[in-house]
Image: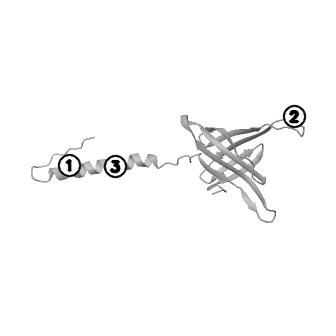
Amino acid sequence: MVISSTVRPGSGAKTIKMTLSVLVCSLFLVATSSSGAQEREPSVTGFFTDMRYVRESGDLVGTEVWIMKAGGGRYYAAVQDAEGGPRIPVVVPVEVSGSRITFTIKEHLVDQDGRPATDLVIKYDGIVTRAGLSGMVNSEPLKLKRGKSYWQ
């Protein structure tokens, strides 16, 4: 956009054109930056945890989920549960749609004789916010705070 005005020679025409140019550029920057200031969805990546140590019983309890991005726009979650003590973490692919995440953990079980038993299937479905991850795990409510890992 070019703004020009007719000004008599020697009356500061260059100053007026410069002032108008700065004004137009400033208005353009304000207009374009205000659209970027709109509320954006929070990143789905990060640590989400409610894992804690219970001094009275000596137990470690809770869940920790670390969602990370990999190549090709794919996401993965490292998930660790604790019921008395920490279980071995598992890494699973995560489906992401906006701030909604879903993933499933399948654990192959064996009975006391070593024969295959019914698999344990744990389905996570939740919404990521700036505060954390909330949703459902196999029809049970889940609320994990965003922040540092219990292990940090």
Q: Mark 3 and 2 residues: CB-CB less than 8 Å, in contact? A: no
Q: Which residue is drawn at 65% across and 45% down?
A: 127
Q: Which residue is drawn at 84% across and 37% down?
A: 110
Percent coordinates x, y for residue 128 in the rendering: 63, 47
Residue 54 horizontal side relative to residue 126, left or right: right
Q: What amino acid does circle 1 point to? A: Lys
Q: Which residue type does callout 2 highlight?
A: Arg
- The image quadrant where one finds the N terminus is top left
Mark 1 vs 2, N-terminal side = 1
Number of the front mark, 1 or 2: 2
Separation (CA) of disc 1 from disc 2? 85 Å
For label 1, the crowd category at 10 Å Cα-Cα, with few meaning under 14, some 14 to 19 and many 20 or more, is: some
Label 3, label 2: how far apart the Cα atoms are: 72 Å
Residue underneath mark 1 = 17
State whether residue 49 is above or below residue 139.
Answer: below
Callout 3 touching callout 1 (CB < 8 Å): no
What residue is rendered at 61% in x and 39% in y? 96
The crowding category of the residue bearing disc 2, from other C-alpha atoms within 10 Å (few below 14, some 14 to 19, many at least 20), is: few
Which amino acid does the dot numbered 3 rest on? Leu
Q: Name the residue under label 2.
A: 115
Q: Is disc 3 surrounded by few (<14), some (14 to 19) or many (20+) residues within 10 Å?
A: few
- Between disc 3 and disc 1, whose residue precedes? 1
Task: Using the image, determine if residue 150 lies above or below residue 128.
Answer: below
The secondary structure type at the circle numbered 2 is: loop
Residue 115 image position (x, y, % from top left): 87, 34
Q: Name the residue under label 3.
A: 27
Q: Which mark is residue 110?
A: none
Q: What's the distance in space between the residues labelled 3 and 1, CA to CA?
A: 15 Å
